[in-house]
Amino acid sequence: MVYRLETISLEDKAVERLLQGKPFKELSPRDKLSIAYYHLEKLRQLNGGYISSPYHGQNGGDKYNVFWLRDIMYATYANEYIGAYDKMIESYRLILRIFHKYQHKILLGARKRHYLGSCAGEVIHARVHPITLEEITREWGHHQLDILGLFLYKTGDLMKKGYNPLTTDQMETLILLRDIVLYLITVRWHSDPDFGVWEEGPEVHASSIGSVLAGLTMWHDDGYYHSKYSSQVDIHRFLSIPEEFIEMGRKSLDTILPCESASRQYDMAQLSLIWPYNIASEMQIKQILRNIENELVRRNGVIRYPGDKYFNASHDNPVGNEAEWPLGFAWLSIVYSKLAQRSIKNGNIFGKPQEQIDKAEMYLEKLESVMTEDGKVPELYTYGRENWNVPLAWAQSFYIVARQSLNWVYEITAQV
């Protein structure tokens, strides 16, 4: 059963009663969803943003109780899956506010012929203060194309579903969107390096190219995403995307795949090419999943890529000691639920739906086995122990999306 907001909202005392003497993984599906959403809501701020984690910088670590733009956009995805579109729109309007605040940087960046260095003065920063929305640091690479790609993709998706995330001054906002497209075209998003989802590089990343390609394709009238929607909303008339840039992006993505970059044969971030973007071909999807499941899945989660040094258990011997991210289990469960839905609808195009459902269930069970006993998704595990970033906002959101996606599959199969 797919649950809606009115059936899963909980207060503090209700959560205490549900968890009293009973671990999270033994609760009913509805109660699990309710508690997971409760923890996510604890991270939501009055302006519609989500801090990445409650962590305040113990042990000299980096502070996560701030806004990461990507994290906000993924964290609020859970609201769509429980029918709370008003909250999702509020979150995306916050991102718009941040883009408006730093629109001068987008224009400065658009004046460059191509990407050079960290470009801290000419790019939107990935992280801002949750109240003032001021940039926090210039110390690491902020040129992250997937942030802009995700924003274009999801705002277009919401508009095609009948929800308008744009502000009341739509003309001003459309000018901003056009500036973003100009920026992407100028920095040659399809061939120049960025710092990617994990804020490392610079390199040319398949996940970044795919994100921007999906964003531009969503606003381009080529019919690629039309089958997703019950009715057609012609958003392309608001934002002109030349066909040649779609073609260049597709060619670049096909060239770099199945690798993520020159230094990485595979990467967890490539799952985004399947969900949410659905921008990879059937053959590419199979190869991405084969690589990730064979090479990156571990006991407590999915490593981001081989040799990842972030929270690595041995910096002298990083390969085989990478941090394990529960987020990856949620992502794989979502992907297999989506593939099952498409197979049921289109006639087993990715294999037998039941096999995909079984995998979606398996990864969701794996995820629940490494969540805390009160239903929080940690950022990662090192030495078999979770780190202090608990819960991680977008991982918490992905759990909700994973559970609801599987519920949708159950409803569809019951009707077949």
Image (spheres, grey):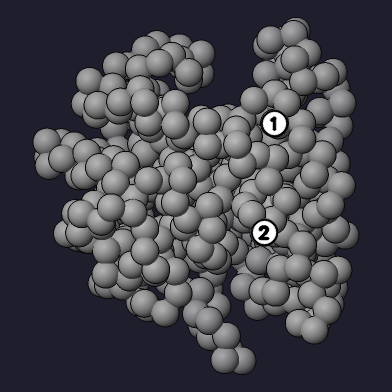
Residue at 53 percent of width and 85 percent of height: 57
Residue at 70 percent of width and 40 percent of height: 258
Task: Return the residue found at the far front.
Answer: 113
Say what secondary structure mark 2 lies in: loop
Q: Closer to the camera: disc 1 or disc 2?
A: 2
Instruction: Decide if residue 364 is on the left or right side of residue 331.
Output: right
Residue at the spot of label 1: 284
Quadrant housing residue 313: bottom right
Residue 330: image location, x then y, percent: 70, 47
Q: In this view, does 111 lie above or below 127?
A: above
Is residue 224 visible in the rendered structure shown here? yes
Disc 1 from disc 2: Cα separation: 19 Å
Quadrant of image for the C terminus: top right
Residue 56: image location, x then y, percent: 51, 82
Is residue 168 visible in the rendered structure shown here? no
Quadrant housing residue 334: top right
Q: How crowded is mark 2: few (under 14 residues within 10 Å), some or many (20 or more)?
A: few
Residue at the spot of label 2: 263
- Between 82 and 17, the one nearer to me in the picture: 82
Residue at 77 percent of width and 62 percent of height: 306
The amino acid on which the numbered mark 1 sits, given as a three-letter code, is: Gln
Q: Is residue 177 above or below residue 98?
A: above
Residue 298: image location, x then y, percent: 85, 58
Instruction: Decide if residue 203 is on the left or right side of residue 160.
Output: right
Say what secondary structure mark 1 lies in: helix
The amino acid on which the numbered mark 2 sits, given as a three-letter code, is: Ser
